[in-house]
Image (cartoon, rainbow, N blue to C red):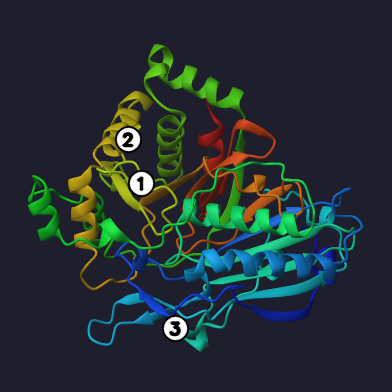
Amino acid sequence: MASHKENHFKVSLSRTLSVYPKTLHPLHLLTLSNLDRQCPIHMYLVFFYKPSQANKNLSASAVFEQLKAGLEEALSVWYPAAGRLTMGPSDGKLNLWCNNGGAVLVEAEAQVRICELGDLSQYNELFEDLVFKPLVDEGLTEMPLVVAQVTRFGCGGYSLGIGTSHSLFDGPAAYDFLHAWASLYNIKASQPLNHHHPLHPPVHERGRFLETKETNDLCRNSNPTTRVVAIDHLYQLIREAADDRSVENYVLRTFHLSGEMIERLKQNVLGEERGKFSSFEVVSAHLWKARTKALGLTKDRLVCLQFAVDTRNKMVPPLPKGFTGNAYVLASVALTAGQLEEGHVVIAEKIKKAKNSVTNDYIDAYIEALDGPQANLPPLKELTLVSDWRRLPFHKIGFMGEEAAYVSPLVPPLPQVAYLMQSPSETRGIDLRIGLLPNMETAFSHYFLRNVQ
């Protein structure tokens, strides 16, 4: 964005309110799982709704009141979202105190038009002004778990910036919560519901994830020697990168792959074997190879690809529909940079194998491995992380009675994470949002777009 646009981009806050459940829930402690405790920070999304027939006559005050009314209803059912994190006095572990403490909703205004923000698919630092961020100084246990800011633009369009604690929800759970809230907003606003996402009654208790390993061993034949490959690989990377702990700023870029481009990639790099692999496996292999190549690492350097696997249907029995906690574990593949130069078929095979290795035993071992003291992950440029959001089309959540023009994630805790998102312009298309070191941006673009254009 040009500097003169940055100079006149100002967001003015009109009011900030705490929003409480319409129906208060009895106070109680919700025990979190080790998966919930990994990352107790807020994840932010900004929904952009351009001016339209559905919202052009809505005042900012009316939109705010309808969002507030819908959120009050949603918090009555998704009551942990109105609670606060708390530290166990004896073990220091995070749990969730369901105390009806409320969420925070902010009304704001910006004089610029949405079109002046440029390409909404490309991250812009100005997006950070479109979300409300609780003060970290207040302490983890005082922070609201859900915060939202609705901003009206000079053109009559709106943005809705929402932050949810990662200890409260993972991606699918946040998606369900936001759909529930949007549905209630549209009912309050007498707006049509354009996207019918099946909503199941939320299940907040962490259940299966709280069972001890001893309990699981008694209930079924468990393999006591199951290794958590993802954690083993991280330790290897940390040891090898011990002399290179420099912290660098990342540039967030979005690359669009149409359905046609994905098919072309499969044809070019897999040939007759393209039917054996999913789009995720092929794109992840291609992304990993391109990013490693752009880093310019020596061939003997260890590199690692890790990606989130949803365990909801991996467990036996599966988790209940509507489960609202974190249910993701990481699968992992590690190779030297030289080995990664092998063909896409070999790499895609390894990714498929890693995905299929996530079994009950692996999940149990993963959760148990997280039971010890946790430390922040040091900078690891050799680590490529992928999070697959293609089944979570956030742009279809219609708070204004219609789909969002775009939904932009803000800077994640680990900026090099690559998000695979469903493209709003094409269901089969993928928008890849990734953090890149400035000195590798041009090289990555070259290697990643090769074989797809």
Residue at (28%, 82%) from the top-left corner?
92
Name the residue type under label 2.
Ile
Residue at (60%, 49%) from the top-left corner?
253
| Viewer-nearest of discs 2 and 1 | 1
Residue at (42%, 67%) from the top-left corner?
167
Q: Which quadrant holds residue 108?
A: bottom right
434 horizontally vs 66: left or right? left
Q: Residue furthest right?
A: 57
Residue 141's mark? 3
Q: Earlier in the sequence, mark 3 or mark 1?
A: 3
67 or 417, which is in the foreground?
Answer: 67
Residue at (71%, 55%) from the top-left corner?
399
Label 1: which secondary element? loop
162 horizontally vs 223: left or right? right
Q: Position of residue 96 (x, y in %)?
A: 40, 75
Q: CA distance from mark 2 to mark 3?
A: 39 Å
Label 2: which secondary element? helix
Q: Which quadrant holds residue 58?
A: bottom right
Q: Residues within 10 Å of mark 1 (few under 14, many from 20)?
A: some
Residue 351's mark? 2
102 horizontally vs 380: left or right? right
| Viewer-nearest of discs 2 and 3 | 3
